C-alpha cells in the first residue's frame, strides 16, 4: 500500500510560475484565474504525490513553505505586485521610448525593457486614441495588451477594456477583449 504525504514542491513551483507570468505582463485576469482555479488542483496533486518525494523537515513543509507559497499566489492575484515591480524597473526606459515616439521618431521592436518585452510600439492615430503612446507586450494581430501612457479614466473611453491597472499617474496596463 502506497503512503501519501504532502509535498510542497509543486505548490512552490506554481507560486514561482504565477509570479513570473505577472512579471512578464501576462493579462492580469488570466493570472487571477490561474491563481484561483489551478491552485486547488496543485494542492490536491501535492497531497497525492508518492511519499518518496517528501521534504524531511515537517516544520519547513507545514509552517513555512506552504503558507508562503499560498501567500505569494494570492498576493500576485490580488495586487499584481510583480507586474508593478517590473514596470517600476522599466519606467525610465519606457518614458524615453514614449518621448521618442511623441517626437515622431521610430523605435525598433521587439525590444527588452527591463524584465518586459515590448513587441510593438507606436502612437495612437485613431480619433479616440490620438496621441496615446502604446507599448504592446503581445504579438501583432490580436487585441491590444500592454502599456499605454494615459490615465485610467481616459483609457476607459480610448480602449475596449478587459483589464486596466493604474501603474502611476502617466501609465496604465491594458488588456482589451
Image (cartoon, helix red, strand yellow):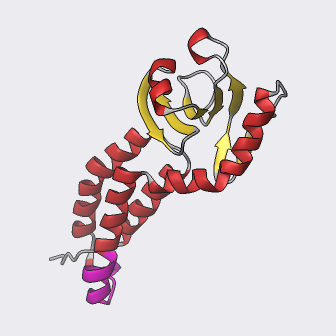
State the extent of the magenta-drawn residues as a range: 52-65
The relative height of residue 31 versus residue 160 in the rendered view (above or below) is below
Determine if the magenta segment contains residue 57. Answer: yes
Determine if the magenta segment contains residue 79. Answer: no
Residue at the farthest front position: 169
Q: Position of residue 78 (x, y in %)?
A: 34, 51
Q: What secondary structure characterizes most of the magenta part?
A: helix
Residue at the farthest right position: 105
The relative height of residue 94 versus residue 126 in the rendered view (above or below) is below
Q: Position of residue 66 (x, y in %)?
A: 29, 73
- Horizontally, residue 159 falls left or right of residue 40, namely right
- Horizontally, residue 38 falls left or right of residue 134, namely left
Name the residue at 24% across, 74% down.
6
The image quarter containing residue 40 is: bottom left
Name the residue at 59% across, 50% down.
87
Q: Position of residue 49 (x, y in %)?
A: 27, 69
The relative height of residue 168 versus residue 175 in the rendered view (above or below) is below
Name the residue at 45% across, 40% down.
165
Amino acid at each position: 500500500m502506497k503512503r501519501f504525504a504532502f509535498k510542497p514542491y509543486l505548490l512552490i513551483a506554481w507560486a514561482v510560475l504565477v509570479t513570473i507570468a505577472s512579471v512578464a505582463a501576462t493579462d492580469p485576469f488570466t493570472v487571477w484565474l490561474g491563481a484561483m482555479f489551478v491552485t486547488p488542483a496543485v494542492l490536491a496533486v501535492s497531497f497525492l504525490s508518492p511519499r518518496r518525494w517528501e521534504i524531511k523537515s515537517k516544520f519547513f513543509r507545514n509552517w513555512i513553505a506552504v503558507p508562503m507559497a499560498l501567500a505569494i499566489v494570492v498576493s500576485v492575484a490580488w495586487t499584481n505586485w510583480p507586474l508593478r515591480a517590473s514596470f517600476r524597473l522599466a519606467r525610465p526606459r519606457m518614458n524615453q521610448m514614449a518621448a521618442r515616439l511623441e517626437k515622431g521618431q521610430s523605435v525598433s521592436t521587439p525590444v527588452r525593457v527591463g524584465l518586459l518585452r515590448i513587441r510593438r510600439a507606436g502612437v495612437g492615430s485613431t480619433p479616440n486614441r490620438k496621441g496615446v503612446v502604446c507599448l504592446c507586450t503581445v504579438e501583432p494581430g490580436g487585441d491590444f495588451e500592454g502599456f499605454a501612457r494615459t490615465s485610467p479614466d481616459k483609457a476607459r473611453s480610448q480602449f475596449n477594456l478587459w483589464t486596466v491597472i493604474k501603474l502611476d499617474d502617466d501609465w496604465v496596463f491594458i488588456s482589451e477583449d
